[in-house]
Amino acid sequence: MAEAGSSHPLPDARPAWRPARAARGWRPTGSPSPTPAAGAAVSGGRAGAEGPPPEVLERFAGARVARLATITPDGPRLVPVTFAWHRGVAVWAVDTVKPKRSRRLRRLADIEADPRVVLLADHYSDDWARLWWVELRGTAAVLEGGEAAAALGALAARYAPYRSSPPPGPVVAIKPLAWAWWSAA
């Protein structure tokens, strides 16, 4: 509880983090998405590991940056990452182009402790009819050898700074388990 004599209403210990379930449109995992009426525009949906419709995957793969969420004992950690869609997985790497204190990033320790991650690609516009997001839920693993080299090639094909200064790694792949998406249009 709050300290004696304190006017602060919050308890001294934070409750354990857990996802909200009351969000609009929330359905338990495995529940089918409602089928739209004939001729109605589909603005959102869900899919399993098989992936979203091609136009949704294209939108996701075309995003220049995404937000990576990892799990920590204190709750989620969220960081922006550059990524590529490569051979059915999303890949990203630790680079030296953007300044970092170390190559041993907290996100790597988080993945080592719990490989469940979320990668969110989105688009904002002041024209809200152009808003969209695509969420990939999956498991992350460090790639090595030829797999890592091929993933680095995919990243270099997308980002010019990686062509002149290839990331030393580690290289991480996110294997999809589930997808969700929404679009205003």
Image (spheres, rainbow, N blue to C red):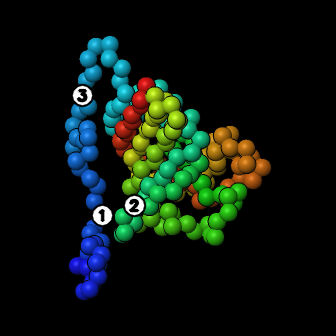
Mark 2 vs 1, N-terminal side:
1
**Amino acid type, residue under disc 1 in the picture:** Trp
- Callout 2 crowding tier (Cα within 10 Å): few <14, some 14–19, many ≥20: some
Tell me the element at label 1. loop
The image's mark for residue 76 is 2
- The picture places residue 149, in percent across and down from the top left corner, at 64, 49
Q: CA distance from mark 3 to mark 1?
A: 29 Å
Mark 3 vs 1, N-terminal side:
1
Residue shown at 36% from the left, 69% from the top = 73
- Callout 1 crowding tier (Cα within 10 Å): few <14, some 14–19, many ≥20: few
- The picture places residue 3, in percent across and down from the top left corner, at 27, 84
The image's mark for residue 1 is none
Residue shown at 32% from the left, 13% from the top = 39
**Residue 87 seen anywhere in this rendered image of the structure:** no
- Image quadrant holding the N terminus, namely bottom left
Residue shown at 46% from the left, 28% from the top = 129
Tell me the element at label 3. loop
Q: CA distance from mark 2 to mark 1?
A: 8 Å
The residue labelled by disc 3 is: 34
Q: CA distance from mark 3 to mark 2?
A: 29 Å
